[in-house]
Image (tube, grey):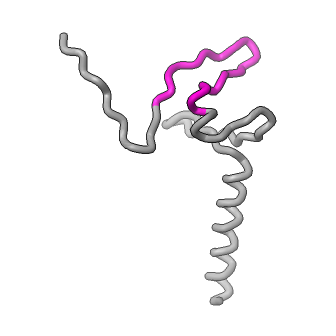
């Protein structure tokens, strides 16, 4: 059998497999923490889609993104 290396598009990552502990906790792989600048004490939002799975996002960045969307919507509604 030929050993083919899986190619991953630029900016996309596969960090491996993590195990869920007895308390439902997982360890975010070191490389993922480094790339996404996740440090102890950071808050993460956990999103879920029953068809697609679970996703994490740093809450500060997501809330900033959401605020920008809401502000853009207000400007659009006000016609400014």
Identify the residue at horizontal 67%, vertical 53% (top origin): 62
Residue 33 position, x and y percent, is 63, 33
For residue 27, above or below residue 39: above
Q: Is residue 40 visible?
A: yes
Q: Is residue 30 magenta?
A: yes
Q: Which residues are magenta?
A: 14-32
Instruction: Please state, as top left, top right, bottom left or bottom right, where the C terminus lies in the image.
Output: bottom right
Image-quadrant location for residue 18 = top right
Image-quadrant location for residue 29 = top right
For residue 72, above or below residue 11: below
Q: Nearer the viewer, residue 64 or 23?
A: 64
Residue 74 position, x and y percent, is 69, 78
Q: Is residue 48 visible?
A: no
Residue 5 position, x and y percent, is 29, 24
Q: Is residue 69 left or right of residue 59?
A: left
For residue 72, above or below residue 62: below
Identify the residue at horizontal 63%, vertical 27% (top origin): 28
């Amino acid at each position: 059998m030929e050993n083919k290396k899986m190619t991953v598009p630029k900016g996309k990552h596969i960090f491996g497999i993590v195990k869920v502990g007895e308390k439902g906790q997982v360890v975010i792989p070191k490389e993922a923490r480094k790339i996404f600048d996740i440090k102890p004490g950071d808050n993460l939002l956990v999103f879920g889609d029953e068809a697609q799975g679970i996703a994490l996002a740093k809450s500060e960045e997501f809330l900033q993104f959401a605020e920008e969307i809401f502000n853009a919507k207000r400007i659009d509604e006000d016609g400014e």
